[in-house]
Image (spheres, grey):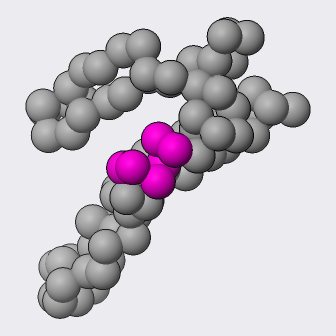
Amino acid sequence: MKLLTALFFAATLLALPLAAEAEERVDGQFAQSGPQPNSCVPHKIAVDQLSEMFNEKVIGLGLGKNQQSVVELYVSSKGS
């Protein structure tokens, strides 16, 4: 259950920036929706929650597709 919760939490953190940047198409063109509010969880809060709730620490860093994002890999001593 902890693994499922951790995966859900990680997926949510990764999906929020993508959802915030998504634009709707209207009549074949992108709608001008104006500035989007920042819907991301601050990094320090996310890291603190992973540490406190799941005893997870970062073991890997990398760049996402097209080198436009940073990916951090967290695991606990239990391997989740």
The one nearer the camera, 60 or 22, is 60
Counting from the top left corner in percent of width and height, residue 46 is at 48, 48
The image shows residue 78 at horizontal and vertical percentages of 73, 11
Q: Residue at x 37, y 28 (%)?
A: 72
Image quadrant of residue 26? bottom left
Is residue 69 something one can see in this rendering? Answer: yes
Looking at the rendered structure, the number of numbered marks drawn on it comes to 0
Q: Is residue 58 left or right of residue 55?
A: left
* Residue 38 location (% of width, % of height): 31, 73
Q: Is residue 36 left or right of residue 57?
A: left
Taking the image as shown, residue 71 lies to the left or right of residue 9, namely left
Residue found at x 43% / y 46%:
14
Q: Is residue 15 visible?
A: no
Name the side, left or right, on which 71 lies relative to 49: left
Where 7 sits versus 59, above or below? Answer: below
Q: Residue at 47% across / 54% down in the picture?
A: 45
| Residue that protrudes farthest toward the left in the picture | 67
Magenta-colored span: 43-48
Q: Based on the picture, tell me whether residue 55 belongs to the magenta stretch.
A: no
Of the pair 38 and 42, the residue shown nearer to us: 42
Quarter of the image containing the N terminus? top right
Q: Quadrant of the C terminus?
A: top right
In the rendered image, which quarter is residue 79 located in? top right
x, y percentage for residue 31? 21, 85
Q: Residue at x 39, y 70 (%)?
A: 39
Residue 69 higher or lower than 78, as above or below = below
* Predominant SS along the magenta part: helix
Vertical side of 40 occupied by 7: above or below: above
